[in-house]
């Protein structure tokens, strides 16, 4: 009888040990996924917005200001540090993601918005993600 109890007790311990190691594996995999997600979301980028003509040439004179970037995954808007200055063309601290870039249209002019993937592959040699908005005027 004692021998039977020891065998049952041993089997129960073995089951607990195997379940515990599977749970540890799941917890470790979850922790690794969380770490990868945190590392991905902690990367920040700067976007430089350029106003260009239909051929990609810079437009020298325009009245456009108040640029914005909208994260298409979260819906959050990002603006330059001081969007009310004359011409601020850099939006800082953008998390990795897909953005709609645009500018508030003027009375007789504006620029088309564009969708850009912001990530390390999109950075230029100066460390900016360049965004070109095509100028139009009436």
Image (cartoon, rainbow, N blue to C red):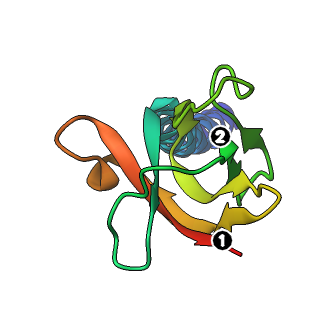
Q: Residue 12 shows which numbered tag? A: 2
Pick out the residue farthest to the bottom. 54
User: Residue visible at 74% across and 26% down?
Assistant: 84
Image spot of residue 18 (x, y percent): 52, 44
Q: Are marks 1 and 2 in contact (CB under 8 Å)?
A: no
Q: Is residue 4 left or right of residue 45?
A: right
User: Residue visible at 67% across and 23% down?
Assistant: 85
Spatial CA distance of label 1 from label 2 is 79 Å
User: Residue visible at 59% across and 34% down?
Assistant: 13
Compared with residue 52, is residue 69 higher up or lower down, i.e. above or below? above
Image spot of residue 17 (x, y percent): 54, 35
Pick out the residue farthest to the left. 125
Q: Toward which corner of the image does residue 106 lie, by quadrant?
A: bottom right
Q: Is residue 59 left or right of residue 57?
A: right
Q: Is residue 36 left or right of residue 75?
A: left
Query: Quick one: SS at disc 1?
Result: strand
Image spot of residue 29 (x, y percent): 48, 44
Quadrant location, the N terminus: top right
Q: Nearer the viewer, residue 128 or 63?
A: 63
How crowded pointer 2 is (Cα within 10 Å; few <14, some 14-19, many 20+) is rated as: few
Compared with residue 58, is residue 40 higher up or lower down, i.e. above or below? above
Mark 1 — residue?
Answer: 137
Q: Nearer the viewer, residue 111 or 30?
A: 111
Q: Nearer the viewer, mark 1 or mark 2?
A: 1
Query: Quick one: SS at disc 2?
Result: helix
User: Residue visible at 44% across and 35% down?
Assistant: 45
- Which badge, 1 or 2, comes first in the chain's sequence? 2
How crowded pointer 1 is (Cα within 10 Å; few <14, some 14-19, many 20+) is rated as: few
Image spot of residue 57 (x, y percent): 32, 65
Quadrant location, the C terminus: bottom right
């Amino acid at each position: 009888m004692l021998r039977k109890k020891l065998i049952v007790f041993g089997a129960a311990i073995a089951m607990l040990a195997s379940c515990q190691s599977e749970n540890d594996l799941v917890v470790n995999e979850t922790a690794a996924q969380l770490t990868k997600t945190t590392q991905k979301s902690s990367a920040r980028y700067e976007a430089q917005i350029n106003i260009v003509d239909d051929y990609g040439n810079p437009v020298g004179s325009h009245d456009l200001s108040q640029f914005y970037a909208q994260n298409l995954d979260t819906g959050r808007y990002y603006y330059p540090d001081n969007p009310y200055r004359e011409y601020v063309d850099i939006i800082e601290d953008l998390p990795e993601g897909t953005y709609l870039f645009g500018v508030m249209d003027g009375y007789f002019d504006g620029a088309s918005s564009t969708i850009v993937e912001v990530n390390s592959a999109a950075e230029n040699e100066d460390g900016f993600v360049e965004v070109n908005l095509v100028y139009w005027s009436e």
